């Protein structure tokens, strides 16, 4: 399912226009992004939890040259699905 198909499904289930469903989905995704940028986690009971994880710096290998390279530390978004997400 892509974004436009998700918007269609939201509009049909909620009984709203596709424009309103698109605005609601965009606002939801932006809110999740903003919270993650602030290192906050978002817990949606029955769906899952979005959180931020720190990845430590590490040494890697460039596959083209086989030379060792340093991979810097970074933050990554993580999603853990709820146990009953599939029903």
Image (cartoon, grey):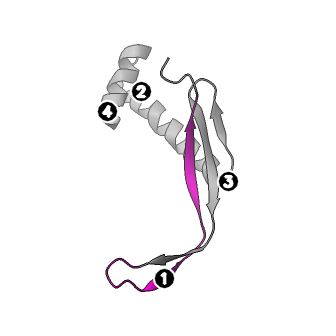
Please indicate, yes or no, whether residue 29 appears anywhere in the rendered image. Answer: yes
Helix, strand, or loop for circle 3?
Answer: loop
Distance of label 3 from label 2 (alpha carbons): 27 Å
Distance of label 3 from label 4 (alpha carbons): 29 Å
Single out the mark in the foreground, 1 or 4. Answer: 1
Q: Going from the N terminus, do you reach mark 4 or mark 2 first?
A: 4
Distance of label 1 from label 2 (alpha carbons): 47 Å
- Which range is magenta? 62-82
Helix, strand, or loop for circle 1?
Answer: strand
* Quarter occupied by residue 18: top left
Q: Kindly indicate whether the residue at mark 2 contacts the one at mark 1 (C-beta within 8 angstroms).
A: no
Q: Going from the N terminus, do you reach mark 1 or mark 4 first?
A: 4
Mark 3: few, some, or many residues within 10 Å (few <14, many ≥20)? few
In this orientation, which residue lies closer to the viewer: 63 or 20? 63
What residue is rendered at 49% in x and 76% in y? 60
Q: Which mark is residue 69?
A: 1
Q: Which residue is mark 3?
A: 38
Q: Which residue is mark 4?
A: 1
Mark 2: few, some, or many residues within 10 Å (few <14, many ≥20)? few
Q: Going from the N terminus, do you reach mark 3 or mark 4 first?
A: 4
Q: Is residue 42 left or right of residue 27?
A: right
Mark 1: few, some, or many residues within 10 Å (few <14, many ≥20)? few
Q: Which residue is mark 2?
A: 20
């Amino acid at each position: 399912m892509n974004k436009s198909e998700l918007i269609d499904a939201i509009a049909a289930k909620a009984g709203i226009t596709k424009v309103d469903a698109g605005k609601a989905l965009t606002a939801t995704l932006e809110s999740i992004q903003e919270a993650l940028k602030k290192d906050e986690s978002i817990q949606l009971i029955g769906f899952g939890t979005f959180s931020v994880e720190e990845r430590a710096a590490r040494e890697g290998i460039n596959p083209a040259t086989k030379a060792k390279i340093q991979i810097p530390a970074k933050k990554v978004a993580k999603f853990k699905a709820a146990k009953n997400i599939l029903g």
